[in-house]
Amino acid sequence: MDIDPDVPQIACFDTAFHRGHAAHTDCYALPWAFYEDGVRRYGFHGLSYEYISERLAEVAPAVAQGRTIVAHLGSGASMCALRDGLSLETTMGFTALDGLPMGTRPGQMDPGVVLYLIDQKGMSTREVTDLLYRTSGLKGLSGISGDMRDLLASDDPRATLAVDHFVHRCALSAGMLAGALGGLDAFVFTAGVGENAPAIRARIAARLTWLGAELDPAANEAGAMLISTETSRIALYVLPTDEELMIARHTLALITAS
């Protein structure tokens, strides 16, 4: 702004894609005044989900009109339930700490743990913040790394534990989102882990068999776009995301309209 104050500054909010949710979806069971004050489930990775929604409509239009779960699995991880390409429910909430375990963030956790850390362990809010954002998740659980590649390459039992925990929580969230959708037609893997870790895709897909998912192992190992079998009742896709492109599109639309 100091160099050229006339250059427009544009913010593309990662929460915007989820703003169509009903109040009963976004609220917490707290006194209503907190909701009115902004304490609600915002959700994140919206730019990624928006891109995948558009991309799925290009590669599989009929599927895109149905019930889809998109798994944005990376250093930051979340899942989103889409119906007709629109966000219906997502795993992240008020902050990006909620939902799935991530590289350095714990994901869903009893808030009583935070109260315990402050009241019984004497930790300051700054110390708890550092713990939850920087030293927890796969990194904290494994004691090795928050990078899934390192964990998959390790034979350390704690690395195995971290991977098992990640897959377990992904499977639980998939069940929750399928419940929100009233069934499931497709499941999309995206982001760093989702796009590049066939072992993780295979393990999550194995936990979706009760929903009718049937993985094609060869297609999965090859990184094909469609990795489900012809007889699978649920289509399984691998679609690279492009959040930067969505930012560029929104920016262009805004500056050309003004």
Image: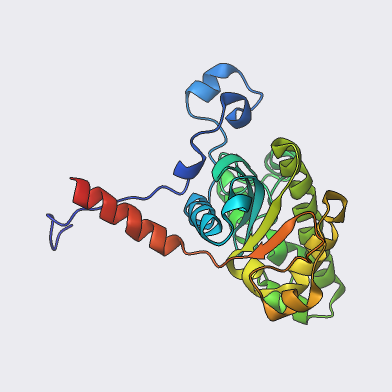
Residue at the image position 53 percent from the left and 18 percent from the top:
33
Can you give x and y, in whole percent of width and height, for residue 105 in the image? Answer: 64, 56
Residue 195 falls in which quadrant of the image? bottom right
Count of labels in the image:
0
Q: Is residue 89 above or below residue 127?
A: above
Residue at the image position 65 percent from the left and 74 percent from the top:
196
Residue at the image position 74 percent from the left and 47 percent from the top:
173
Looking at the picture, tell me which residue is in the foreground, 121 or 173.
Answer: 173
The C terminus sits in image quarter:
top left
Residue at the image position 87 percent from the left and 51 percent from the top:
210
Can you give x and y, in whole percent of width and height, for residue 130 in the image? Answer: 58, 55
The N terminus sits in image quarter:
bottom left
Q: Is residue 98 above or below residue 133?
A: above
Residue 122 falls in which quadrant of the image? top right
How was this image coloured? rainbow
Residue 87 visible in image: yes
Residue 127 visible in image: no
Q: Is residue 123 above or below residue 236?
A: above
Can you give x and y, in whole percent of width and height, for residue 228 in the image? Answer: 75, 65
Q: Spot the residue most to the top.
A: 32
